[in-house]
Image (tube, rainbow, N blue to C red):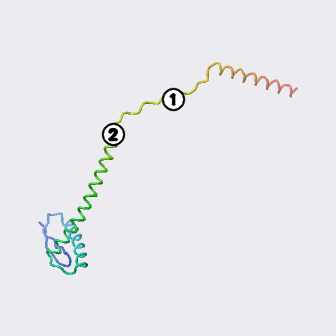
Amino acid sequence: MPEVKIEIDGRSFDVACQAGEEHYLHSAAKMLDEEASVLAAQIGRIPEARMLLMAGLMLADKTAGLQDKLRAAEDKLAEREAELDQLRNAPAPEAERVEVPVVPQEVTETLAEIAARAEALAETVDGQRAG
């Protein structure tokens, strides 16, 4: 088990940890040292046990706040996942029938006849102009 030297508020401590977890121990010690520095700036020099207790309580308070935020985010995520599941499992909407008006065949034939007469008249007018 490796032993790591950490420093909290200018005081050195030798702490054992699991192999490979030295980085986590240094990170945790840095956070505790930051809290101890805040206490030392506010209160001044205090006994080691009291300083560590108060710094630990300050970190625990921050952790509790973060856990509350995490729980709220997890609850919100669960709601969104339930909503997504509901939408995914909902039956497909029924097809909507759209009616397109159709021009009756006799109207189409009448329009074709009128177009043919208009073309014949145009040819007659063009013939009279040319001649």
Q: Quadrant of residue 34?
A: bottom left
Q: Position of residue 97 (x, y in %)?
A: 48, 28
Most distant residue in the bottom direction: 45
Tell me, for residue 98, which label it has, or none. Answer: 1
Q: Callout 2, which amino acid? A: Gln
Q: Position of residue 16 (x, y in %)?
A: 12, 68
Question: Across the whole image, how many numbered discs are drawn on residues?
Answer: 2
Q: Residue at x 23, y 63 (%)?
A: 63
Report whether 129 appears left or right of 106. Answer: right
Q: Callout 1, which amino acid? A: Val
Most distant residue in the front direction: 43
Q: Position of residue 96 (x, y in %)?
A: 47, 30
The foreground one among 131 and 43 is 43
Question: Is residue 18 positioned above or below 44 on the image?
Answer: above
Most distant residue in the top direction: 106
The residue identified by callout 2 is 86
CA gap between label 2 and label 1 equals 28 Å
